[in-house]
Image: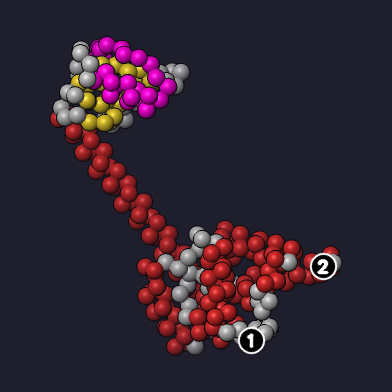
């Protein structure tokens, strides 16, 4: 491939990319990553195995990933573009190959019904497919962000509940794993009915102390100094069952 051909191919890929009706899609880091992959494949010739696929067709199909657009409608639109006739299998397998190349881009089953409803609404209104795909991409990106946010909120709430339960267990006098109260830097654990405090040091180590009360200034017996909480835990598991 000559330098002139390489330049023309890259210009063609970029021109096809900016034809996307979705500004969100154009700015999406995953879409930019896919654009870079298209350029690399074109320059090194690795895309030759998919001989029916022009850059315009591939850009169009990539934009439809995760949008639940019926394959039959994709097939019709793709066959209106320059290139050999595509079969249903051509479209299905090329779409699958794209999804395998970018595993973070996948069809979210939770959004399927909503996407199909939007598609049916827009198709009945006479909206052309590229515009429908643009709307669906905007919709799925917003919804996936909402789902991620709700998952984080549920996870944070679960962690907060676990923390409260662990604090109550510590304060009740029951055996428990390392737990800190509030914003305290000290951790407490109780094993075999014995209470231990683990305090951070200025040299980023941990001092293990046998104490009688959950108080930061409570006196106790220093048992050792450890690099990690894991090492201190191993020590406690041995010490807790030895004579006082």
Percent of width and height locating residue 186: 32, 24
Residue at the spot 35% in from the left edge and 56% down from the top edge: 150
Instruction: Tell me which colouring the rendered structure shows.
Output: secondary structure
Percent of width and height locating residue 188: 27, 25
Percent of width and height locating residue 8: 78, 70
Q: Disc 2 designates what residue?
A: 1
133 lies left or right of 172: right
Q: Secondary structure at mark 2?
A: loop
Q: Residues within 10 Å of mark 1 (few under 14, many from 20)?
A: some
Disc assigned to residue 234:
none
Q: Disc 1 designates what residue?
A: 85
Residue at the spot 50% in from the left edge and 63% down from the top edge: 105
Q: Is residue 101 above or below residue 50?
A: above
Q: Is residue 168 above or below residue 79?
A: above
Residue at the spot 25% in from the left edge and 41% down from the top edge: 162
Q: Quadrant of residue 151?
A: bottom left
Placement of the C terminus among the 4 image quadrants: top left
Please tell me whether residue 68 belongs to the stretch shown in magenta: no
Q: Is residue 70 above or below residue 240?
A: below
6 lies left or right of 108: right
Q: Earlier in the sequence, mark 2 or mark 1?
A: 2
Asked whether residue 188 is in view, the answer is yes
Asked whether residue 63 is in view, the answer is no
Magenta residues span: 217-240
Distance between the Cα atoms at labels 2 and 1?
Answer: 26 Å
């Amino acid at each position: 491939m000559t330098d002139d051909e390489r330049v023309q191919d890259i210009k063609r890929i970029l021109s096809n990319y900016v034809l996307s009706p979705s500004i969100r899609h154009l700015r999406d880091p995953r879409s930019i990553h896919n654009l870079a992959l298209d350029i690399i494949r074109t320059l090194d010739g690795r895309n030759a195995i998919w001989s029916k696929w022009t850059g315009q067709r591939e850009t169009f199909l990539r934009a439809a990933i995760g949008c639940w657009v019926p394959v039959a409608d994709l097939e019709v639109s793709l066959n209106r573009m320059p290139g050999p006739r595509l079969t249903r299998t051509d479209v299905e397998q090329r779409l699958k190959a794209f999804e395998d190349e970018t595993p973070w881009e996948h069809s979210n089953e939770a959004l399927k019904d909503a996407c199909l409803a939007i598609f049916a609404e827009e198709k009945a209104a006479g909206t052309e497919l590229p515009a429908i795909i643009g709307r669906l991409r905007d919709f799925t990106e917003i919804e996936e962000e909402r789902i991620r946010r709700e998952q984080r909120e549920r996870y944070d709430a679960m962690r907060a509940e676990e923390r409260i339960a662990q604090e109550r267990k510590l304060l009740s006098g029951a055996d428990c794993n390392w737990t800190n109260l509030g914003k305290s830097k000290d951790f407490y654990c109780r094993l075999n009915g014995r209470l231990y405090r683990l305090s951070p040091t200025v040299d980023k180590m941990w001092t293990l102390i046998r104490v009688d009360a959950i108080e930061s200034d409570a006196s106790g017996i220093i048992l050792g100094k450890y690099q990690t909480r894991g090492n201190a835990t191993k020590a406690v598991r041995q010490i807790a069952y030895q004579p006082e």
